[in-house]
Image (tube, helix red, strand yellow):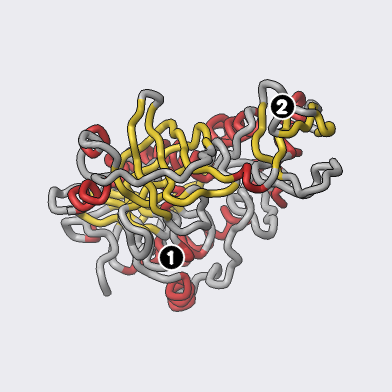
Amino acid sequence: MRNSLDIEGRPEATRVVVAMSGGVDSSVTAALLASEGYDVVGVTLQLYDHGAAVHRKGACCAGQDIHDARVVAERLGVPHYVLDYESRFKEAVIDRFAESYVHGETPVPCVACNQAIKFADLLDTARDLGAQAMATGHYVAARRQEDGSRAMFRAREEARDQSYFLFSTTREQLAFLRFPLGERTKAETRALARRFGLSVADKQDSQDICFVPGGRYAQLIERLLPDAANAGDIVDTNGSVLGRHRGIINYTIGQRRGLGIAAGTPLYVVRLDAQARQVVVGPREALATRRLRLRDVNWLGAGAIETALIQGPLDLHVKVRSTRSPAPAWLTRTARGIEIDLADSEEGVAPGQACVFYDAPAGQARVLGGGYIESAMPEREPLSRPASAAALAATARN
């Protein structure tokens, strides 16, 4: 059986903490490593609900999942710990999620969870437990480079790739993390679960945001921030009032239905102005975006981002939604900060979403980093690709 960790030394002398969510992916990760002789320690995070033994269909991290992780650990004969991260999770993920919506953004809480909880706090705990590595069930690959560092790549099965949610992983964290499922398909994972006799082999994948069952995020935000649903005006792109809204947290960029206004042509939400409490609507063409300004950029490409951009724009591919394929773009640094110019316009891009960089449009492309979208700027005229971009890209990838 192939070694899943790429760690020097005897497996039995290597302690690995496995983040066990109770799902099939993390359970198979633990089973694989235990079968290869590693000293596996399973850790499950109690993130909310005080571990109550209830399971909401399509959700994750609930009490039933903690129970399932414990059952798998017992089956494998490995120690298992449940850590209470509820207050930390509320502060770092749930509260920030709510505040982001109130500011007119569309946050990606799974990125924040990986950044602030799983790959920060939990990783520190793994080191405290004497581990040489921490493994997760994410579908993403991390490979050793010639200089000894590790780089992140998209998963073998494109439909399962989770690199979009891991762009904020640092180089230091990558050196400690392992992703044994990145080179496997979901079908192979479930087959392994059956072979190992795991009770979760046919368990449904989580779909909802774990702390927002049924996708009813507005109810959660109102409970946390009672003033979040203050009403305001619905205006067109010229500022003319067309109607009233019931709180900007109930609207998303690109939304067409449920606006409650009559118009001769279809209207879409094109912008949310939190300060003025306005929902701005316009025709579909007003959704088109060609330039993005980013914040909190994390660079995982070769060298420093300043070096990569020293000669000008860098040719790459980006995803502005987890479900989209990487599209051609180029990265630039301006007086305003780091910006992305899209070769083709994207519709419905919202502040708060992630923009993730790749070195190729398909296959197991390398993840070059990413950032959060601070603003999306429409362009009336097509942008021209800098002549030097292709040459720069070739240099950066070699």
Instruction: Report the residue marked by disc 1.
Output: 158
Whether residue 264 is situated above or below residue 91 in the rendered picture: below
Q: Nearer the viewer, residue 222 or 248?
A: 248
Would you say 284 lies left or right of 257 here? Answer: left
The percent coordinates of residue 159 (x first, y second) are 48, 65
Crowd class of label 1 (few under 14; some 14 to 19; many from 20; radius 10 Å): some
Looking at the image, the residue that sits furthest to the front is 381
Callout 2: helix, strand or loop? loop
Q: Amino acid at mark 1?
A: Glu
Whether residue 91 is situated above or below residue 360 in the rendered picture: above
Q: Nearer the viewer, residue 264 or 109?
A: 264
Residue at image point 69% right, 33% down? 237
Residue at image point 37% right, 63% down? 362
Q: Earlier in the sequence, mark 2 or mark 1?
A: 1
Quarter of the image for residue 280 reads top right
Q: Is residue 238 shown to the viewer in this render? A: yes
Would you say 46 lies left or right of 343 here? Answer: right
Disc 2 + disc 1, Cβ < 8 Å: no
Q: Nearer the viewer, residue 203 or 184?
A: 184
The percent coordinates of residue 174 (x first, y second) are 30, 46
Q: Amino acid at mark 2?
A: Leu
Q: Which mark is residue 295?
A: none
Q: Is residue 16 shown to the viewer in this render? A: no
Instruction: Report the residue marked by disc 2.
Output: 225
